[in-house]
Amino acid sequence: MSIAIKGGRVFQDGAFSELDILLSDGKIAKIGKNLSGDEHYDARGALVLPGLIDPHVHLREPGATQKEDFRTGSMAAIAGGFTTVMDMPNNPAPTTTPARLKEKMQLAKEKAICDVLFHFGATDGNFSDVKKSGAHSLKIYLGKTTGELYLRNPDSLEKHFAGFSGNFVFHASVAEGNEEAQIEKTCENIGRVGALSKKYKRKSHLAHASAKEEVAAAKKHGLNVETAPHYLFLSKKDAERLGKFGSVYPNLRSESVRNGLWGAIGSIDCIATDHAPHTLEDKEAGAHGFPGLETSLALMLQAYWGKKLKLEWIVSAMSEKPAEIFGLKKQGKIEKGFDGSITVLDLKKEWAVKGEELYTKCKWSPFEGRTLKGKARAVFRNGKLVFDDYVFL
């Protein structure tokens, strides 16, 4: 069974062109003009993108499925235009052993409707487990987080660098002190990571940068760097307005810091959601984190409509660059032989964020009530149409 996606403006080689795409056996078989297949999909008036990739999500399963699970989280991903997400290790029983990683992989295989990859978690003592796991990437927390994932032993960081040759992902942020002190300490942590990355010739990636100083420090030391839309579109003023629903880690920053982050946007490699759903009761009790999979693309498109960003930069930062950073060799581009995971974008679709209408299990958003312009109309995963006309098939 093959399907031809016809009539859309296809993102290829950094630009948009009117082309057809033929999907067959889960892959991109041909790209060109006047292609035909067993079926066809009419993409006229829409943009055709490589399936988006989010390198930073918390899908909460196992152990906290009241917040999210692999089915609801992957539905939120697809509805937001993402065909691949990378899940973080800080579950109630963190992903720090091969057995826990295997359990997660099996659960995702049974329930997820997008591709889910996994970051393994580093602790002060699981050096041999990291090697046994076969993990592609290792998440290291240099700021406080749940349980054993926070590295407390100063020697542990270098031991992990010496023993693991895959991708490193760093939570370098701290929660202690005022805004200036938090940013300064985060930059110190980035410096430590940068020195060890150079010493051991490792690829390192900075998670959720929230200030231009963090971006500059990361680039100075050769790290890849991501930010999340909430640091670009929300500030301390919004946190005060939202109350306990404005709590996230790192904190929302002052307007001056937020504006400074926009000034550094050209140095940022990719956009990640840090999708971290909590129940309403969790938030009332002080939990940190926002859902973001279903609003991320549309929010970044507001920067396009506001002439802050080029459309090509947004697509690259949400597909091509994450694939490149994490070595996903058959994703992130529309090329022959690549995975047939495609997002069809209605650039002009206007919609209002309503938590009750979101697919995420938590059913709320810090962007509640905001009108956005741009939405994934259809999504193909591995050559199959799974989402069309803004609903699941």
Image: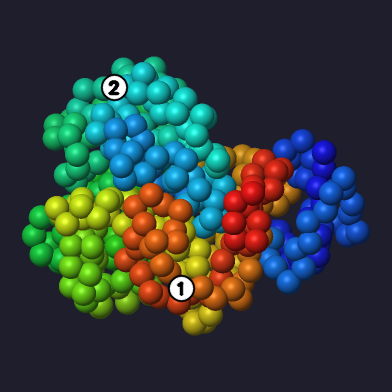
Mark 1 Cα-neighbour bin, 10 Å: few <14, some 14–19, many ≥20: few
Query: Percent x, y for residue 366?
Result: 32, 66
Residue at image mark 1: 352
Tell me, yes or no, if residue 198 can be seen here. no
Q: Where is the N terminus found, in terms of image quarters?
A: top right
Q: As displayed, is residue 250 above or below residue 304?
A: above
Residue 11 vs 124, above or below: the answer is: below
Residue pictured at 73% horizontal, 40% vertical: 27
Element at label 1: strand
**Image coordinates for residue 350, horizontal then vertical, percent:** 54, 76
- Bin the neighbour count of mark 2 within 10 Å (Cα to Cα): few under 14, some 14-19, many 20 and up: some
Comparing marks 2 and 1, which lies closer to the viewer? 1
Residue 119 vs 373, above or below: the answer is above
Horizontal side of residue 363 vs 158, given as left or right: right
- Left or right: residue 108 versus residue 228 is right
Residue occupying image coordinates x 79% and y 40%? 24
Residue receiving disc 2: 127
Q: Decide which of 306, 5 is in the foreground and name it.
A: 5
> Between residues 212 and 361, which one lies in front from this camera angle?
361
Is tag 2's residue or tag 1's residue first in the polypeptide sequence? 2
Amino acid type of disc 1?
Ala
Q: Quadrant of residue 104?
A: top left
- Seen from the viewer's position, the closer of residues 312 and 392 is 392
Q: Quadrant of residue 195?
A: top left
Q: Count of labels shown?
A: 2
Where residue 301 sits in the image (x, y, percent)?
A: 52, 71
202 or 276: nearer the eye? 276
Seen at 45% across and 77% down, the residue is 371
Image spot of residue 383 (x, y percent): 71, 43
Q: Say which residue appears at 25% left-offset and 78% top-offset.
A: 256
On the image, which quarter does residue 217 sit in? bottom left
- Element type at mark 2: helix
